[in-house]
Structure formats: structure tokens, C-alpha cells
Amino acid sequence: MSNETLPQDSQPLEGEQDGGENVEASISLADLNEKLGKEFKDVDSAVKSLKDTQSFVGKKIESAETKEDPAIQKQLDNLQSQLNNSNFYRENPQYDNEETRKLIVALGGKPEEVIERDVFKSTFEKTSAYDKSQESKSVLHNSSRLGQATTKMDDANSAMAKANDAAAKGNITEALDSQRIAEAGAVDSVIDSFNK
């Protein structure tokens, strides 16, 4: 094979072997400087610079892909868990109270999985029934309407006791009058409890 004439400031680079012949290619220092936008003093320093750059870029890409901070990942996982819990309780308000949240935490696991367990369903059903019975008791004991109705009912009971005493003494007229008063008081008591 014949070598082409090279400019004085260029050096041959190794090429591929093709069909058993050595093929040489060349590039001038001026071409390198122009293409790379730098001023190298010789071709060897330009090639070394290219190899260093290639090695450096390869290391940066590799380190960026493999480096994960476990503390940041833990924080991300924690935030994701909090978001999932908030969404669960927003979508399932029947479970959004202190006692039920404690039960779910005690049973362990994700809330959407815990509520499917038989032990949770049974416990939740019982505590819900208890809470409802406590609410109904507080309504009965704290209602001003019921307080007024109770007073009228007590008056009716007193009138009925008076009617019984009068009947026992043989005073039929007084017994009938007291009985009518007792019946009217009892009816008024029931009507007042519904109207107020």
C-alpha cells in the first residue's frame, strides 16, 4: 500500500487493518485545534486531552447512576406513607378517629390491608356499636326537652298516686278527678317531648 503525503505538522494515527494491509489515517494539528476549539502544542497532547475527557465523562455518568442517598430515600418513603395514610382516611372517614387509628397501627400494616382482616372488622363493629350506644345515652340525659317531659310525667305519677289514695278511702269523685289529671299530664308529657 502506498502512503499519502502528510503535511509536515501531522502525525499518522493507527487505523484498522483491512485485508491484511495497514491503513493509516492522519489529521493535522491545525484540524484538531479547529475542530476542538483549543490550541494544543502537539498531536500527542490533543489525543491525551481527548482520552482524559472521555474517561472523565464516563466516570461522571456512572457515578450519577449508581449513587443513591439512603437518608433521602428513607424520607421519600416516609412522605409517601404519610400521603397514602392521609388519602386513606380522607376516603374512609368512618375510620378517621383516634381509637380506630390506634387499632390500625397496633395491628400493623397498611390501613387498606388492615381493615380487611377479620379481627379488625369484629373489633371495629363492636366499638362502633358501643360508641353509638354512648351517644344515644348522652342525648337522653342531656336533652332539655326530655327534662321538661320528665317533670310533667312526675306530676302525672303524683296525681295518679293521689287518685289511688282517694279510691282507697272511698272518695270516688276525688279519685276520678285525680286520675283524669294524671292521664292528661302523661299525654302532655309525651306530646311535649316530640314537639320541642
Image (cartoon, rainbow, N blue to C red):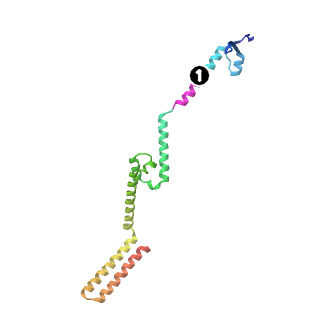
The residue identified by callout 1 is 55
Instruction: Give coordinates of residue 180: x percent, y percent.
Output: 35, 84
Count of picture labels:
1
Task: Report the quarter where the C terminus lies.
Answer: bottom left
Q: Is residue 123 above or below residue 33?
A: below
Q: With respect to residue 37, does 190 lie above or below? A: below
- Residue at 48 percent across and 49 percent down: it is 86
What x and y, as percent, mark residue 141?
36, 67
Pick the residue in front: 169 or 25: 25
Magenta span covers which residues?
Answer: 58-67
Horizontal side of 4 relative to 50 (left or right) equals right
Q: Amino acid at mark 1?
A: Ser
Q: Looking at the picture, how far across and down is residue 160, in whole percent?
A: 31, 81
Q: Is residue 55 visible?
A: yes
Res 158 → quadrant: bottom left
**In the image, residue 158 above or below residue 112:** below
- The structure residue drawn at horizontal position 46% and vertical position 49%, both measured from the top left corner, is 112
- The answer to whether residue 117 is left or right of residue 173 is right
